[in-house]
Image (tube, grey):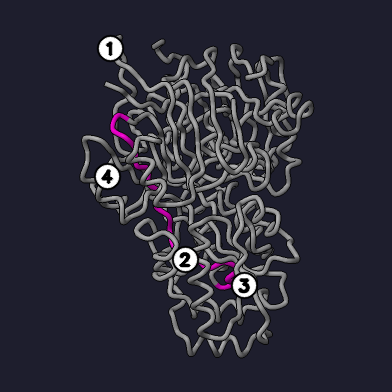
Amino acid sequence: MKKVKGITAILLALMMCLALVACNGGTTDDAGTTQPGGTTSPGGTTGSGSSASPNAPVVPVQPDAPAPEGEDVRYAEAIDILTVATLVVIDCQAPGATSDVNRCVYSCIYDRLIALTPEGEYVPELATSWDSPDAQTYTFQLRNDVYFSNGDKFTAQDVVDTILLGKESVGSMAFDTWRPVDTVTAIGEYTVQIVLSDVNADFLFNLRMPWASIINKAAREADPVEGAWVGTGAFIVSDFVSAEYTTLTRKDDYWGGLVPTKYMTFRYVPEITARTIMLQNGETQASMNISPEDLPMFYNDPDNFTVFEILSSVTNSIGFNMNGPITGDLNFRMAVAHALIRDEIAEAASGRWAIPAVDGTLWGYTTEFRNTDIPMLPYDLDLARQYLADSPYNGEEIEIITGTPENHRGGEMIQEQLARIGINTRLFPTDAPTVAAHASYGSETMQMIHYLNTFSISATSARQVLYPFGAANRASYNNPVVNDLIDLAPTVVDPAERGAIYKQIQEIVAQDLPYINIFYVTRCITAVSGFGGAILDPDLNHDFRLCYVRLD
């Protein structure tokens, strides 16, 4: 096995703080992450892979060893990983193409300009260094030895094209990522200058997200579907069946060096018992979210299996169409809130992987500046019926759309609980892309939605949930005061002042109630012995590039 070289400079530090945390049956500590503020320093930033960014959000991880080396070390040629979410479209700039498995694939086929270590240090990826005198103008020096999977050489123009296309992709995470950019200019072949519309303390953090991956414009124009698969990453897409499986093949000429595994397949298996059986029978090497009832058999067999858990910053919520004649009424939303028993919904949806919300904020559990002083609206059927009587609801059927198996189950419990106060509902169980189309910002048909709200460990992720046209703003929420505060927050570099702004946002949102936070999400991977090298983080941006199964 050829030693991994270039990519080691980026990822071995991550590997030493591997985010696949081996647990002994418990969940991640309730203390969550270290949350120092997520800002760059007032004097700007300089990065070359050695200077830390002490104010960056820190991913909660524990140490493990990188892939072992030596002539006697043997790796499995292929790894099969079972997923609980579908991958329908492979395109880091497409609205709705944001599921867990999308992110896994993106980390393998694309690269970004920079990465963020668990210690909060920004390190080079496609950029070799960068500087900013004012946290508004950034100049990136780029690698000159990188090629896309179609043979095209990577240059500064590809960064320009990626940003400009992203700014046109309204409703996508890429749009939210590149929205702050005012101008982007290629200064020669391997230097790019990005000027933001204002000071933005979150910009570097956003560059480490999957939606900031660099794409190939010419390939996309030549083939709008498969052209989107062309990246500079360690793998190429060799076989793809939408909503079933994706097989990746290693790029032997990857700029970062040869990675341990030749073939990697992400396979959608919605039946929770089937995932257990396939893992036990050796049909797969790893599975996401094994049934809690089956976990003891894997925990109690450490010679053959390992269980990894991590508490994510994603929340499971109910959203209301704020433009709807019924769901846009605060009395109706208050009625729903007082009729819910969150513990029951969480148990029905995700079992032991769910942590029911205990306060009234809408925020990621591990997201910085979470406001835990906001009280949760209590379960009170009498009060719920009173609010319902004061609302415009008159027995109409209210549709609840869901996009994942766990939310289908949670939706059934929500339906049962709302029936107790006389709200008549109909479930619309579907998949993530349909949810994205049916429940996009400004939708005139969506009424209620039970879905995963994609917060990250950085408070900047509130924009995609709460700002007009945000990729995860399924409620079509638009409060001018909140919008102004969201615009203001990234321009404030002092962590305490920024934190106060984000906590004020949470207070206003709790009063407006466009969303009800139901539970926080814990993720699990159960794998065969010898499985390692994957990097999980609470944003679900899991990196499987260096994933391996050791055979000896």
Magenta residues (range): 511-530
Majority secondary structure of magenta residues: strand
Tag 2–tag 4 contact (CB < 8 Å): no
Query: Which quadrant of the structure image shows residue 446?
Result: bottom right
The three-letter code of the residue at mark 2 reads Ile
Does dot 1 land on a helix, a strand or a loop?
loop
Quadrant of image for the C terminus: top left
Does dot 4 land on a helix, a strand or a loop?
helix
Which residue is denoted by mark 1 in the rendering? Answer: 72
The three-letter code of the residue at mark 1 reads Asp
Q: In the rendered structure, which disc, 2 or 3, sits on the residue that comes first in sequence?
A: 3
Which residue is denoted by mark 2 in the rendering? Answer: 518
Q: Which mark is residue 134?
A: none
The three-letter code of the residue at mark 4 reads Phe
Q: How many badges with numbers are in the image?
A: 4
Tag 4–tag 3 contact (CB < 8 Å): no
Q: Residue at x 55, y 81 (%)?
A: 335
Which residue is denoted by mark 3 in the rendering? Answer: 426
Tag 1–tag 2 contact (CB < 8 Å): no
Query: Which quadrant of the structure image shows residue 477?
Result: bottom right
| Cα separation between marks 1 and 2 | 50 Å
Q: Residue at x 69, y 57 (%)?
A: 440
* Closer-to-camera residue (478/249): 249
Mark 1 nearby-residue class (10 Å; few <14, some 14–19, many ≥20)? few
| Cα separation between marks 1 and 4 | 28 Å
